[in-house]
Each structure stands twice: as structure tokens, then as C-alpha cells.
Amino acid sequence: MPDVPPPESCPDWEDLREKRLGERGGEVALEVRACEPDEEFRPGVPRVARRRIWIRPRGVVPDDPILHAAMFVYASDRTLLSTAGLPHGLVMGRTRNASLDHAVHLHRAERFDGWILYAAESPVAHGARGLTLGAMYSQAGVRIASVTQEGLIRVPTFTEAVEPGREP
């Protein structure tokens, strides 16, 4: 498990999003904390294709192992393609992304009751496509899941970026 600050000392992802984009994402199912928030605020500045976040359900997940597994799979789709865009100076919320494939390997039956560290890195992003590899860890450092995703990452054209009724 990577060495990261504890979740309680990391800022809330939605607060960072609001500061960066002027809007909240409205995530209701998951609470997300960013381990490296300072680097999130420099649009257009390339950085290492790595992101580490703490993530947990916002409510109580019923006592059903299938629902806990489903929550891990649901949570696995957070931040992967935006991680692939980091070396290119792309910022979450300013790109159009689409998953081409996504695989989750659950290594053990775990409950999703508390904080999980989700570490992702992208070995390659080229030609509007990015590949990201992820790992989920319990707070005790046990690897729970491995994730891969390849996706399309595009910067919107001027006409796509301008919404009707809004000035560019």
C-alpha cells in the first residue's frame, strides 16, 4: 500500500471540485478525499500520472456481501481516466471521457464500511486514449481489488464547450 496521509487530513473531493470548477459534482453515494490536493489546481501544467484517494460510502451499506462487492465495483470507476490525462495538463471536469473497457478483480470478500485507499496510475495515454491501472487497499494495507480501464479522453472543441445560453 502506498504511503499516504490519513483520510481525516485530506480535503474533500467535492470541495476541491467546487474550488476548481465553481460547481459541486453532487456525488451522493461516495465520500472521496484527495491525498495530493495541491497539484489538483494547476490546469495546463503536466504532472505525474498518479492519483491516490480515500473513498468510502456516505451511508450504511446493508449487510449483504453482494452489495459490498457491488459498491467496490461502483467505486472503482472514480478518477481513472482523469488520472491518464494528468501528464498532458488535462483537468477533471474539462474533458469528455468515455470508458472503452473496465475490469475489476476482487481479491477477497471485504466489507465496504470504512475508508479504502484507491491508488491509480497511468502508464500510457496517447492518441486520445488512456490506460489506467488501479489498486484498492483496506486501511490495514490489505489489497482488496485490482482495476484496469482504457478510455477515450477528449478536450471539447469550442462549439462543444459552449453551452446554449452561456458565454464562452
Image (spheres, rainbow, N blue to C red):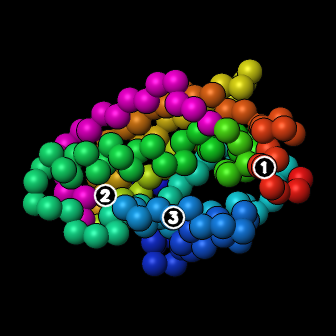
Classify residue 104 by image quadrant: top left
Q: Nearer the viewer, residue 75 or 36?
A: 75
Q: Position of residue 16 (x, y in %)?
A: 64, 69
* Magenta residues (range): 97-113
At numbered mark 2, what does the secondary structure look like: helix, strand or loop? strand
In this view, the mark in front (2 or 3) = 3
Q: Residue at x 60, y 67 (%)?
A: 24
User: Count the marks: how many?
Assistant: 3
Furthest toward the bottom, the residue is 9
Q: Name the front one of labels 1 and 2.
A: 1
Element under disc 3: loop
> Percent x, y for residue 96?
67, 38
The dot on residue 138 is 2
- Measured in 3D between alpha carbons, the distance from the residue under mark 3 to the one under mark 1, in whole angstroms, is 22 Å
Q: CA distance from mark 1 to mark 2?
A: 44 Å
**Separation of disc 2 and disc 3 at Cα?**
25 Å
Sequence-wise, the earlier of marks 2 and 3 is: 3
Q: Which residue is mark 1?
A: 164
- Does residue 19 lie above or below 144 as drawn? below
Disc 3: which residue: 26
Q: Position of residue 13 (x, y in %)?
A: 56, 66
